[in-house]
Amino acid sequence: MGQGMKKKSLTKVMTTAALMSALSLPASAAAATLSDINGSFAKDAILELAEKGIINGKGDGKFDPTGNISRQDFAIILAKAMNLDLSTAPATATFSDVPSSHYAFAAVEAAVKAGLIKGTGNGEFGFGQNLSRQDMAVLFVRALGQEAFAAGKGSGLKFSDAHQISDYAKDAVAAAVELRLLNGTPNGMFNPTGSAERQQVALVASKFLKKSDELKNQTPATPSPEGTKNPPSAQPQTPEAPKPQTPVSTSGGSSSGGSSGGGTTNPDPVTTEMAQPAVSFADGKTIVLAYGETLDSRYVPAAEDFQITRSLEGQTSPVGLKNILIKDKSVILTTDTILPLDQSAQLTYRSLSTGRTIRSAADKVSPAISAKTVTYTVADPSAVLRELVDKANALLDGADGKYPQYEIQHLWTAAQEADAELRGPVTRPEMVKNYVYTLQVVIDRFESSKFQPLTATLNPEVPFVLNPGIMGMEYAIYLADDNVIGNDPATYKLRNINDFLKVSRGTDSPTAHLVFDEAADSGHFKIIIDDFAVGSVKIESTDPNIQISKESDRVRLRLLAADTVTQPSLRFNIYETGNPEPVQVLELPMTLDNTPPAFSVTESTYGDGVITLVADEPIWGPDPNVTLQYIPDSLNESESAGHPVPFDRVNDFTHNYPAGGNRLILTLTENGNAKVSNLTSGKFKIGVSGITDFAKNGKDTYTIEIPVLSFPPRIYN
């Protein structure tokens, strides 16, 4: 890819990254308010994008994950995100179904002018139509600036409904799958005309942002100044420069290059360039440049030094490079496109920087290669196909849990069909060649789809609290999933496994959802990524006095004997599907707590008719019983010293506290304030019962006294 093309693609990536960072409304619909995403496979992506202000709910606290997105609304998003000029819309509408009076007219016209969106044919934009899955692929690939990368890839699609994908979208669908933006369905289909759900768009948008960042970071290194030939900076050694050749004198005169004496005779010219390499295909995606000399591995050409194209059905498309390797006497080019047998490509090589020009160990440089035609041929296609079938079977052995199940099924089917062709009674050369191409494509895609290993981490912000002083079924602790917990806060008895444990496949994978596993002979929770079960979590206790078992839709932890545990931990065993051994084991120490909360006398205050009691930890209780009285320090006309003045809970004061907070607030009513307006200095005496901490620790009654120096008079209108 040329330097200009790379800059153009990078600009698109940067601009469309801005697009996705503005994907509709303000972030006021915070992630925490979305009440209907717990069961969504894209929950983490939705939360991520909502927190960044990229997407929003629908205004009623819901995201509607299975809802659809219309084409005109996506056009508005594109236009606003890319800061297109909406003030100079044309007088005449491009599309008959989006007239100039329509609310989306300016945005649609601006997006069309920028080459971002096209119509659906017949002069129509497709107003009111939902965004389809194939159109989603086209838009995201175009937004990434990867049209050149996508060119020609549609021919390798192996979805069972690939023939239903529109011609204009096939390359983009194939590229989106290869870029890991989109997947097919579990049954091996793509469902191209199906409507893109809001949760699907969120998941792809999250992947898009990561991919755009990845592409932005793939900028080429700054070339060495022209005329230099220093090796790349990663190589500490510098090749010795060629020594200048001195003319040889035959008359004993000066050898300085002048004609002193009887003149000079020049030797044969010094060869500073290697011969043209032999260029051939090693397989459908590997081109080898074979030189006659050993190469210097410190000088590795860049992708932009090559231009490779292929012709298919009269159309020429570029072929990208994924890797360049110097080995012995060869330069090995791995392309991003697999060619069928007997297909040709044209290769041009011209070094754009002498600092990376292909060189031999003797410091000779490679000549330029101009439009060299190379054809992928083999002597015995049947032998090549047999090798591919054997390779496929070797890959399938032990593939469960390491590759997506649909990729395993595709590879198995392709290998079976190719093997049947080889074992047939009659050899069909063209069919053999077709199977060579098909199996190469399927193997290549299969190998690139290998899962990263599952990685689990504990959430340091959420301790697992256990009260060692209580036992019995009424105090059992239950671990459940999002489907059971919903948006409710955790309690001592019911907690969310997803709050404690996070599982993913590397940085590019969304965080897995841990879902209760109902099967009796399996782990406690299934690990779900992209709607597929990829592993399981089995929970153990390091203390035998804590019993762990399954119950209905949750896992029960029961303390068998009170005050018998010392320093217990929960042990999380992480399993990959198909692997009987855990890939990771994590221990979560339990926090033992059998101390009731205490109220601070120094931090508890009275002021302006409000009494605030401050505990040393969060307090819980459905409806605590609170009593309030005032004990004055001195006499007045109606009171004797120390005689308490009672306050009625309803008429004189109210109380409230947020669940899980550490403050209990008493607010005097107008009647209560009137009671204290004529009182002298003294103290409030508050009695509280019916509260505990998170671990169920509490007292029968708390008595808190708050001194009050004086009451300023209050005036009510």
Image (cartoon, grey):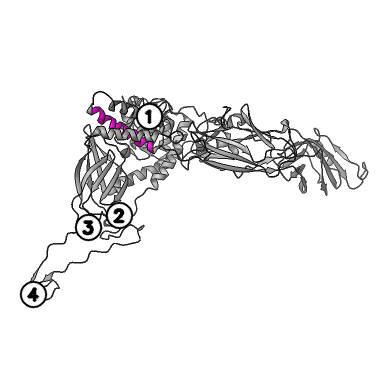
Callout in the foreground (1, 2): 1
What's the CA distance linking mark 4 and mark 1? 79 Å
Instruction: Identify the amino acid type marked 3.
Output: Lys
Helix, strand or loop at mark 1: helix
Residue at mark 4 to residue at mark 3: CA–CA distance = 32 Å
Q: Which residue is mark 2?
A: 297
* Residue 172 is at least partly visible in this image: no
Mark 4, residue position: 251
Q: Please name the residue shown 19% across and 44% down the image.
A: 372
Residue contact at pointers 2 and 4, CB within 8 angstroms: no
Given the image, on which type of amino acid does mark 4 rest? Answer: Ser
Q: Disc 1 marks which residue? A: 412
> Which range of residues does the magenta coloring cover?
430-447
Residue 163, horizontal then vertical, whole percent:
32, 25
Image quarter where the C terminus lies is top right
Give how far apart the Cα atoms at labels 1 and 2 are.
39 Å
In the rendered view, tell whether residue 625 sits above or below residue 366.
Answer: above
Q: Which residue is mark 3?
A: 364
First-in-chain label (1 vs 2): 2
Indicate left or right for 291 with 653 as reference: left
Mark-to-mark CA distance, 1 and 3? 48 Å
What secondary structure is marked by label 3? loop
- Assign the magenta stretch its main secondary structure: helix
Q: Does label 1 or label 3 sit earlier along the sequence?
A: 3
Q: Do residues under tags 3 and 2 come within 8 Å of each other at their CB atoms?
A: no
- Disc 1 marks a residue whose amino acid type is Trp
Q: Nearer the viewer, residue 531 or 271?
A: 271
